Amino acid sequence: MIEQLFAVPMATFGLEKPEPLISDLRALFLAAEQRGDEYRNEIRRDTQHGELFESRFDLFRWQEPPVQALAKFCHTALASVISEVNEYEAEELGALKFDYHAWFHVTRKGGYQGLHNHANASWSGIFCVDPGDEVPERPDSGVVRFHDPRGNASYYMDAGNSRLTPAFCHGSYQIRHQAGRLLIFPSYLYHEIFPYMGERPRIVVAFNCWINPAS
């Protein structure tokens, strides 16, 4: 029997008929971007380059209905992941407290993020509001690349390990965002966002979560 040891759990969820919600979120976030420092995170991270606006981390506490609908969708999805990978019973899951930092990014042409992870949290997520334009001459425009956390997994490659199936493969994994899709992954996982070269703004929401027994 082959065991799937040290696997990285990654989950995707999609909104049904996402356009009404993402249209409202797009308008809300672009308006907030235009108001500048009122919503901007005061810390500019050294992994952020070019035209990239990052909001403060209180997004899920906004009371606007579109934001609250998104927060509920993300929480429900994450709770289902937590329940499955930890094999929690419903009563155990109900006794947990979920604390979030959440924010939005508006990335314009040339903006990107270097390699980073989200330390000091257990789970993270990215929800795509608008993936922006496809750029045929730059197929890597705006893609997210996740890196294998096993640093020595690909030190030696031959015919014995060069065609491993996804549960066992190594190297990197790229994802192109789709509007209305949520990606959930462990916060330790290193990832980067390639330079976005489209004209329409690329808009995503990200979050980190801490999960502990409710006091």
Image: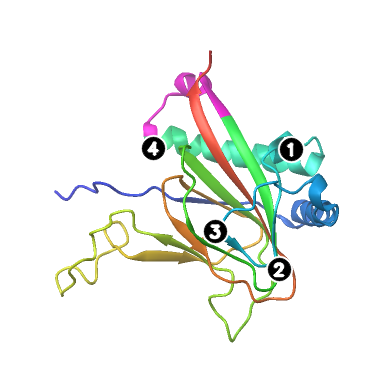
Q: Is residue 1 above or below residue 174?
A: above
In front: mark 2 or mark 4?
A: 2
In the rendered structure, the answer to whether residue 205 lies left or right of residue 65 reads left
Residue nearest the viewer, comparing 108 with 20 = 108
**Disc marking residue 68:** 1
Q: State the residue at coordinates (46%, 42%).
A: 119
In front: mark 1 or mark 2?
A: 2
In the rendered structure, the answer to whether residue 126 lies left or right of residue 115 reads right
Locate residue 72, reporting x and y percent.
66, 37
**Secondary structure type for disc 1:** helix
Question: Which is more N-terminal, label 3 or label 1?
Answer: 3
Q: Which residues are magenta?
A: 86-98
Q: Badge 1 local density, few (<14 within 10 Å), some, or many (20+)?
A: some
Q: State the residue at coordinates (77%, 52%).
A: 25
- What amino acid is labelled 4 in the image? Val
Give the Cα distance between marks 4 and 3.
31 Å
In front: mark 1 or mark 3?
A: 3
Give the Cα distance between marks 1 and 3.
29 Å
In front: mark 4 or mark 3?
A: 3
Q: Is residue 13 magenta?
A: no
Give the Cα distance between marks 1 and 2.
25 Å
Residue designated by label 2: 108
Do callouts 1 and 3 mark residues in contact (Cβ within 8 Å)? no
**Secondary structure type for disc 4:** helix
